[in-house]
Image (cartoon, grey):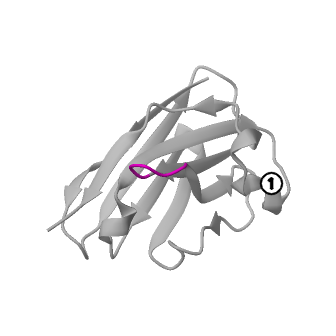
């Protein structure tokens, strides 16, 4: 499986941006996909995750109500609409993939994901 993430860029505070992650090269009957981010000088952190099979997406508290993760099962694609962006959202955003579903608490854990995309840079600055 390969992941291709894109959609990053430079935006002003308060603006919106949409990231997309496309999965290819495998079978996709059941999987979990997530977004993580790493800000300069900080550790990578969980942002949002969704399961192909359904159920509510989960979010980090810092992005809840501002970011929306969604999926297109037909295209094996996960999108994340980011709104009301803040300078502290500046980071490299990575999409991550694992086959199968895990319990909700585990969806936030990096080690649950075996395949990672290359990252796309989001810069929020005036």
Q: Residue at x 36, y 72 (%)?
A: 83
Going by the picture, which residue comes out furthest to the front?
41
Q: Is residue 78 left or right of residue 91?
A: right
Q: Residue at x 80, y 54 (%)?
A: 106
Image location (x, y in percent) of residue 126: 14, 68
Q: Is residue 13 left or right of residue 79?
A: left
Q: Quadrant of the N terminus?
A: top right
Q: Is residue 85 left or right of residue 106?
A: left
Residue 6 position by quadrant: top left
- Please tell me whether residue 122 is drawn above or below residue 75 in the rendered image: below
Q: Main secondary structure of the magenta part?
A: loop
Residue 124 position by quadrant: bottom left
Q: Nearer the viewer, residue 24 or 115?
A: 115
- Identify the secondary structure beneath mark 1: helix
Magenta span of residues: 39-43
Q: State whether residue 7 appears in this view.
A: no
Going by the picture, which residue comes out furthest to the bottom?
65
- Please tell me whether residue 42 is drawn above or below residue 17 in the rendered image: above
Image location (x, y in percent) of residue 116: 57, 32
Image location (x, y in percent) of residue 12: 18, 68
Residue 104 position by quadrant: bottom right
Q: Is residue 101 magenta?
A: no
Q: Nearer the viewer, residue 28 or 44?
A: 44
- Please tell me whether residue 15 is drawn above or below residue 32 in the rendered image: below
According to the image, label 1 marks what residue? 106
Q: Nearer the viewer, residue 86 or 29?
A: 86
Q: State whether residue 114 appears in this view.
A: yes
Q: Is residue 42 magenta?
A: yes
């Amino acid at each position: 499986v390969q992941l291709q993430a894109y959609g990053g860029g430079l935006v002003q505070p308060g603006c919106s941006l949409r990231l997309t992650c496309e999965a290819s090269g495998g079978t996709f009957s059941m999987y979990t996909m997530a977004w993580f981010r790493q800000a300069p000088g900080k550790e990578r952190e969980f942002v949002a995750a969704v399961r192909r099979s359904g159920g509510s997406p989960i979010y980090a508290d810092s992005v809840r109500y501002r970011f929306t993760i969604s999926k297109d099962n037909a295209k094996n694609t996960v999108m994340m609409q980011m709104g009301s962006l803040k300078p502290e959202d500046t980071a490299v955003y990575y999409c991550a993939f694992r086959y199968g579903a895990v319990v909700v608490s585990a969806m936030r854990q990096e080690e649950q994901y075996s395949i990672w995309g290359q990252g796309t840079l989001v810069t929020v600055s005036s």
